[in-house]
Amino acid sequence: MIEFSLKNKLIFDGYVLTTNAVMLMLTAAAWAVLTAGMSYASELRIGSTYTTQDSGLLEVLLPAFEKATGIKTRAIVGGTGQVLKYGERGDVDILLTHSPADEVRFVANGYGTERREVMYSDFVMIGPKTDPLKLRGSTDMVSAFKKINQAEVLFASRGDDSGTHKMELRLWARAMLSPAGKWYLSTGQGMGQMLLIANERQAYALSERGSFLAIKKRLDLEVLIEPEPPLANIYGVTLINIARHPHINAAAAKQFADWITSSAGQLAITTFRIDGKQIFFLPTSTSVPIKKAS
């Protein structure tokens, strides 16, 4: 334990230190605090998902934000479930994820202070071009899941608590099924890697459209089902609670949240294309920010 005495001396676990020793300790301590703070203040750590990375969107958004603000960014990528844990621990400064219910819960539980809806893409069923179950052209995703389960044909799952995995589990639940068996491939991988595994095994899979299109030329798979109405993949930006994590770069995080929901950020989102196709769309005008109750 360290404590200051009333006689201009410092007592460290019972030992009286000289003035020089005190100065050295204080200098070292100050340097440690300064350098520790620099890693947070000099960059914005954005916790985001494999789908924003694998689609190529982050490669457009982050440079545009840096150019507009001068703030350097670093993307820390994982499945949405993992990224939310990063936020709970204060390992990132802001979240850009796609599991609205979990994000609202994150704010309600005091880990975040505000969630804003940013954009949406959509989920599709991809599978082998031979399409053994003849799913091509259907718009009923739940019916397709039932057929896959009944026939026990190979199905590749993210299996990583990501937003895509959570949507897949909701679809199994709607079909009143719990998939299990050798046919169900729980990969534990990000979007791009899961698609490569599905391609290798010629399996069906639920995919975010942009991530599939980004590597389509490397795959012998195609989009088989485009649900009607579309199966929306909704993204939100969530501010971390600085009261829990005083070290985070809250000022830069606020700037990013403001920018990505501004006309400049929205333009960067809506003009992003893969093979000439728009992938991400803006939320409806009725979307409102979710804030922590005071």
Image (cartoon, rainbow, N blue to C red):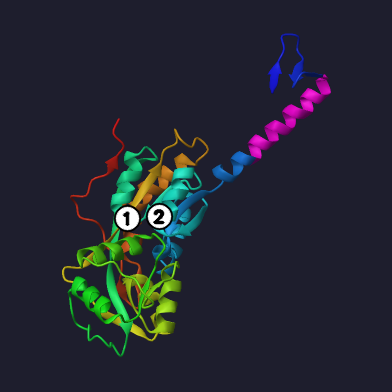
Density class for disc 2 (Cα within 10 Å; few <14, some 14-19, many ≥20) is many
Residue 248's x, y, as percent? Answer: 50, 41
Q: Nearer the viewer, residue 160 or 86?
A: 160
Which segment did they paint magenta?
17-35
Residue 281's x, y, as percent? Answer: 27, 63
Q: Amino acid at mark 1?
A: Ser
- Of discs 2 and 1, which sits in the foreground? 2
Residue 44, numbered circle: none
What residue does disc 2 label?
81
Task: Name the residue at 38% across, 71% down.
Answer: 211
Rendered position, 30 above or below 265: above
Task: Name the residue at 31% across, 88% down.
Answer: 129
What residue does disc 1 label?
99
Task: Name the residue at 77% across, 15% down.
Answer: 9
Residue 98's x, y, as percent? Answer: 33, 57
Q: Nearer the viewer, residue 181 or 55?
A: 181
Tell me the SS state at disc 1.
Answer: loop
Rendered position, 197 above or below 132: above
Q: What is the chief secondary structure element of the magenta stretch? A: helix
Q: Amino acid at mark 2?
A: Gly
Tell me the SS state at disc 2.
Answer: helix
In this rendering, would 119 be left or right of 161? Answer: left
Q: Is residue 27 magenta?
A: yes
- In the picture, residue 222 is in which quadrant? bottom left
Q: Earlier in the sequence, mark 2 or mark 1?
A: 2
In this rendering, would 171 be left or right of 188? Answer: left
Q: Is the Cβ of the residue at disc 2 closer than 8 Å to that at disc 1?
A: yes
